[in-house]
Each structure stands twice: as structure tokens, then as C-alpha cells.
Amino acid sequence: MAIFQNPLWGYSFTYPDDWAQKSNGEMDGFAQNAHAFDQDGAVNEQAAHMLVRGEFNGKRSPIAPLWNQHITKLSIMLGAKKLGGSPFSMGGANGFEAEIQLPKKTNRRLWVGILARETVILHFMVSHKKTERDAFEPQVTEIVSSLRFLDGLKGLDRTSENIPIPPTYLPIEADTLVPDAKNNDSWRAYDGKSGLDALQNFYYRELPNFGWEISEFIPFPNQVEVGFTRLRIHKDDITATLGILPFGKKQPLGKIIIKYENE
């Protein structure tokens, strides 16, 4: 069995060695056949597949309203019967699941689920032809059942002050993000291609693991005049502000800026 781990959302699955796995933006996909994914990892909706998408729930809001909204939109979009769903628990997370009753002329089965654990909401969608059920369903059920949540990550890069850096993020000149940082050694900046929500979840989970206390957390989007994610953190005699700046409109990517207040 192969192991898939999403380091920012902090979850993992095991899946058969001969299955294909691709990630595209905020979506992680699994399929029996690599041809299920076209260029850049997007899924061919006619092929049997499972998709998982993370959502940040910094306020730990109840997910029942979100589920009702989600299932209603799917039902309308697909011309399917609306289902309320049944309780669904896996890997220490709780939520709802439902099989969407598609129109009879559609030779497909569609299962959707939603799970919440602490600040993470996971959206699941499994789709396959009815004729593929016997070969596909037992294996995809095993994958879903293998869900585990990570309490922390090992081997992360970190700043000299022990602030963790997300995987694949690299240092850049801070004044490329904040002009005031020019010729000021109190600033650090990092660039990569991860989604804003995933980065918010990463820092909310990992900073305490590295000895930092979060004294203020303003997620993005927010109802105050802060156009980015802001975390005020401190450890020993060091205080810092960590910002995650959104770039892009539909699914904004995050760039990281850190300002130390007393070094």
C-alpha cells in the first residue's frame, strides 16, 4: 500500500500501489487508472475516482448548515433527489454522508461526505459507473477508512527563531511583498504555491508544536479592515507578527511575511 499525506491540511490515506494519485490546487484525487486524470491533475469525470478537498474552519462552526447547503446545491446542479444524509465518522472526525440519487438515465453512482475535526473540514466525492461498483467500491471504501489526522509534521524547515516553513516554500526578499521592509532586517518573507486556507490551517496547527503561543488570530477573509491573515505570536522573549497574504481571486495562493518586534 502507498501512503498519501497532505502536510498543510494534516491528513493521510493509504491506497493500493497500483492506483493513481494526483493533486490539483486544493483537491486531492485518487483513481484506479492514471487516465482518470488529464493534464495538470484535473479529473476526468467519466472515470471512477475519489476527490478530497480541505476547508479551513478557524471558528469551529457547526457543519450541519454547510452540509445542507452543499447537498442542496449538488441536487439542483445534478437534477438529483435531495437527501438529508446520515451521520458519518472516520479518523476521529464527524460529519455526514449521502448517496446522491442521480436521474435513472445516468449510469453512475455518486457518494458525498463531509467530516470536521478541529479546524479542518474535509469534503469527499466518490463517483463511478454502476457497472464498476464491484471492482471499485470495496477499494475506495478502504481508502476512506484509512483516514488519519496528523498532530504535527517532522522535518520541516524553520527560521532561526524556530518558526516552521511550509513544504516547498522558499525565502524571497521581504520588500517584494511589503515595501516598508526594504533594508530592515526584522522582516522575513517566503513564497510558494499553496492555497490560503491550507496555509492558515498549517500555521494554526504547527506554531504551538514549535513552542509559539498565538495571542491573536485574524483569519482571511475577515470582518475587520485586515486584507490578509494575521497571527500575533510570541515565544520566550520574542514577539512576531506572521501574515499570510492572498494573491489571486478565485482560489488565492498565500505568500508569507514575518516581522519580528524584538530580536
Image (tube, rainbow, N blue to C red):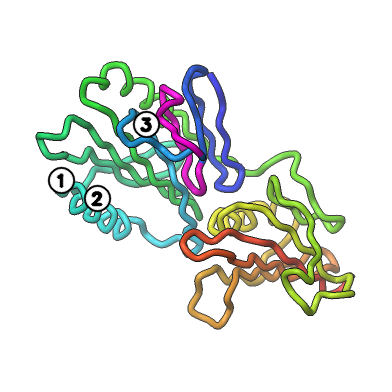
Q: Nearer the viewer, residue 97 or 127?
A: 127
**Secondary-structure class at tag 3:** strand
**Is 8 contained in the magenta span?**
no
Amino acid at the residue labelled 2: Leu
Expressed as whole percent of the image width and height from the top left, the position of residue 37 reads 44, 33
- Which residue lies at the image location 33% right of the left edge and 28% below the top edge? 48
The residue that label 3 is drawn on is 49
Expressed as whole percent of the image width and height from the top left, the position of residue 47 reads 33, 29
- Which residue lies at the image location 22% right of the left edge and 20% below the top edge? 131
**Secondary-structure class at tag 2:** helix
Among numbered discs 2 and 3, the one appearing first in the sequence: 3
- Label annotation for residue 80: 1
Expressed as whole percent of the image width and height from the top left, the position of residue 177 reads 72, 70
Q: In the rendered structure, are the residues bearing label 1 and label 2 in contact, judged by CB atoms less than 8 Å apart?
A: yes
- Which residue lies at the image location 59% right of the left edge and 66% below the top edge? 246
Please provide the residue range marked out in magenta: 24-39
Marks 3/1: CA–CA distance: 19 Å
Q: Is residue 171 above or below residue 180?
A: above
Would you call the spot at circle 1 few (<14 residues within 10 Å), some (14-19), or many (20 or more)?
A: some
- Which residue lies at the image location 74% right of the left edge and 60% below the top edge? 212
